[in-house]
Image (cartoon, grey):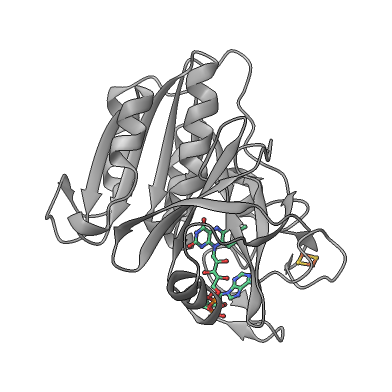
């Protein structure tokens, strides 16, 4: 277990903070770490940004553990970290233009992917969606990388009024896109994967399932009917492969294995 020091905390909006930790993680974009809050729980988190000496995680206050992190962890404290784990996104040889499409707190791993793509000279169109303008994250960070950025908000307070999948539909019409990468609410990712399939565009989706071990031994995160372990065989899966999974976009399992629609 690593225990890197927190060197910066930024509140992006009430309920969402970006933590910068001093450690050379060398994760692949799309991989995740297990974050341990002593006395509370251990939860999976994506890597949002990396340099040779530090990495960032964007954490939404979603329940017991993340609330404790938001309330108790200050600059100078340390967090318990295991990982990096899982299979990340694959940038394909020869791709010239990609779209990354993130909904809500699904956006962090896509920022890390954009970082890598830009280094390789791949053009990136980032589509980010949120419920309201205040809840849009990392717009400036994508712009600073040199990505073209399009935003959508459910209430129309910024960018396109509606879902980010509407923006993607337009983008596929107006741009020659080689690959699409997505992370966010599963209903959104189903739509993205279907649109990519219909347009014959390569697509990868990043799944979220309840995790315990994080590295493939406990079986908590297995997907019906294949036994794909999201922590080890994912979290990133091929879009067409994900569309074949009966639970993709329909249900997941709680910590005790109960099916949650
Ligand atoms: C691969 C992966 C990457 C993730 N990346 C991010 C990220 O970058 N930013 C972010 O804010 N969140 C991310 N999450 C979600 C985050 O792990 C959950 O929001 C967090 O676990 C909530 O825990 P809690 O104790 O605060 O809330 P709880 O009150 O325990 O639960 C709130 C919700 O989170 C789910 N949850 C709780 N514990 C886990 C767990 N161990 N594994 C999966 N889901 C859980 C519950 O089913 C419930 O729906 C990621 C999840 C996965 C699987
Ligand atoms: S969390 Fe244990 S197998 Fe995936």
Instruction: Say above or below: 92 vs 236.
Output: above
How many badges with numbers are in the image? 0
Q: Residue at x 35, y 36 (%)?
A: 141
Q: Is residue 147 above or below residue 77?
A: above
When the figure is inspected, residue 203 is found, relative to residue 165, above or below; the finding is above
Q: Name the residue: 29% across, 40% down.
A: 139
Q: Residue furthest left?
A: 157
Give percent across and percent down for residue 168: 33, 39
Which residue is situated farthest in the front direction here?
76
Q: Is residue 14 left or right of residue 115?
A: left
Q: Quadrant of residue 39?
A: bottom right
Could you say which is closer to the camera, residue 239 or residue 64?
A: 64
Residue 2: quarter of image: bottom right
Residue found at x 64% / y 47%: 236
Does the rendering let one see residue 233?
yes
The image position of residue 34, as x and y in percent, is 68, 61
Pick the residue in front: 253 or 142: 142
x and y, in percent, of residue 69 in the image: 51, 71
| Residue 170 visible from this viewpoint | no
Q: Is residue 35 above or below residue 118?
A: below
Ligand 2 appears in which quadrant? bottom right
**In the rendered view, does 67 fall on the left or right side of 15?**
right
Please tell me which residue lies in front, 113 or 66: 66
Q: Is residue 53 left or right of residue 20?
A: right
Where's residue 70, x and y in %? Answer: 44, 70
Picture residue at 71% right of the left edge, 83% below the top? 257
Find residue 116 and report its image quarter: top right
Quarter holding the N terminus is bottom right
């Amino acid at each position: 277990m690593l225990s890197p020091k927190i060197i910066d905390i930024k509140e992006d909006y009430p309920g969402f903070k970006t933590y910068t930790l001093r450690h050379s993680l060398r994760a692949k974009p799309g991989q995740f770490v297990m974050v341990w809050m002593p006395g509370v729980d251990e939860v999976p988190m994506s890597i949002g940004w990396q340099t040779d000496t530090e990495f960032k995680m964007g954490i939404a206050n979603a329940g017991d553990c993340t609330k404790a992190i938001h309330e108790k962890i200050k600059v100078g404290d340390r967090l318990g970290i295991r990982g990096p784990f899982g299979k990340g996104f694959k940038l394909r040889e020869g791709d010239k233009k990609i779209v990354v499409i993130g909904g809500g707190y699904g956006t962090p791993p896509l920022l890390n992917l954009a970082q890598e793509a830009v280094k390789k000279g791949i053009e990136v169109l980032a589509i980010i969606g949120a419920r309201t303008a205040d809840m849009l994250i990392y717009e400036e960070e994508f712009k600073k990388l040199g990505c073209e950025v399009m935003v959508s908000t459910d209430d129309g307070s910024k960018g396109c009024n509606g879902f980010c999948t509407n923006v993607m539909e337009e983008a596929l019409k107006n741009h020659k896109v080689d690959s699409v990468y997505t992370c966010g609410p599963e209903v959104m990712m189903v739509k993205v994967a279907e649109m990519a399939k219909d347009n014959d565009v390569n697509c990868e989706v990043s799944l979220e399932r309840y995790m315990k071990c994080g590295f493939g031994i406990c079986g908590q995160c297995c997907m019906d009917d294949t036994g794909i372990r999201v922590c080890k065989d994912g979290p990133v899966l091929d879009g067409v492969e994900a569309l074949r999974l009966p639970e993709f976009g329909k249900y997941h399992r709680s910590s005790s294995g109960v099916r949650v629609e």
